[in-house]
Amino acid sequence: MKGNLKFTILTIGIVAIFFIMGREIVETRVKLKNTQYQIVQEKKEKVWLTDELNAARAGLTRADRDLRAANSKLAFVNRKILSIKDGNHELAMEKQGLEYKIALLQEEKRTMETRLHSLSELKEAIRQVKIEMRDNKISQRLEHIRQQKEIDKWETALGNRGFFTKDGQDYYKPKVNVEVRSANISLNKK
């Protein structure tokens, strides 16, 4: 029995070892399946993260391009603003000059109004205007006469091309050939 007992203990020990080893194998298989599942999940996550990284890089590239475009637009707008500021400064200076001229003209208008409100001043102004109108007419007439003389000089220089004319009318009598035919010849025969 001692041999049987040893054998039974040995068998129980072997069965226990096999059971423990079987359990460890099952646990190892479960751990292996879990590890494989985790590897698959991590691969999926890696693919997803790679896609996200690529999308983020594409977004970053697009954002960089947009940033450069916005910077160039901003530089263009800044240049426009500077030119508009310069133009605005010039306009402000021109406005001041025009305001000064308006003030001078208003002062001149007031002096003219005070001058023209008195009857003697008004009569003198009317006489002055009439004299200026007469002088203008005389100078225009003299200029017209001078221009007409110049035109006549050029027409005389060009000549009348062999025609006898005076004051635009012909004074040279042209030759006329009169051909007389007898009455018996018909007009169709020549």
Image (cartoon, grey):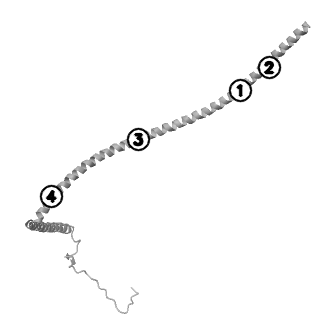
Q: Is residue 107 above or below residue 132?
A: above
Question: At numbered mark 1, what does the secondary structure look like: helix, strand or loop?
Answer: helix
* Viewer-proximal residue among 173 and 97: 97
Q: Residue at x 70, y 28 (%)?
A: 37
Which amino acid does the dot numbered 4 rest on? Glu
Q: Determine contact: label 2, label 3, CB under 8 Å.
A: no
Which amino acid does the dot numbered 1 rest on? Asn
* Residue 150, x across and y down, in percent: 17, 66
Q: Is residue 119 above or below residue 170?
A: above
Q: Residues within 10 Å of mark 3 (few under 14, many from 20)?
A: few
Image-quadrant location for residue 82: top left
Q: Residues within 10 Å of mark 1 (few under 14, many from 20)?
A: few
Which of disc 2 and disc 1 is earlier in sequence?
2
The residue beneath circle 3 is 74
Q: Residue at x 38, y 43 (%)?
A: 77
Which of disc 1 and disc 3 is earlier in sequence?
1
* Residue 174, x across and y down, in percent: 24, 80
Give left or right: position of 160 versus 54: left
Which amino acid does the dot numbered 2 rest on? Gly
Which of disc 4 and disc 2 is earlier in sequence?
2
Separation (CA) of disc 4 from disc 1: 104 Å
Q: Residues within 10 Å of mark 2 (few under 14, many from 20)?
A: few
Which of disc 1 and disc 4 is earlier in sequence?
1
Q: Which is more foreground, mark 3 or mark 4?
A: 4
Which of disc 4 and disc 3 is earlier in sequence?
3
Q: Which is more foreground, mark 2 or mark 3?
A: 2
**Of the numbered discs in the image, which one, if any, rests on residue 108?**
4
Q: Residue at x 27, y 47 (%)?
A: 90
The residue beneath circle 1 is 34
* Viewer-proximal residue among 189 and 99: 99
Give left or right: position of 170 versus 115: right
Which of disc 3 and disc 2 is earlier in sequence?
2
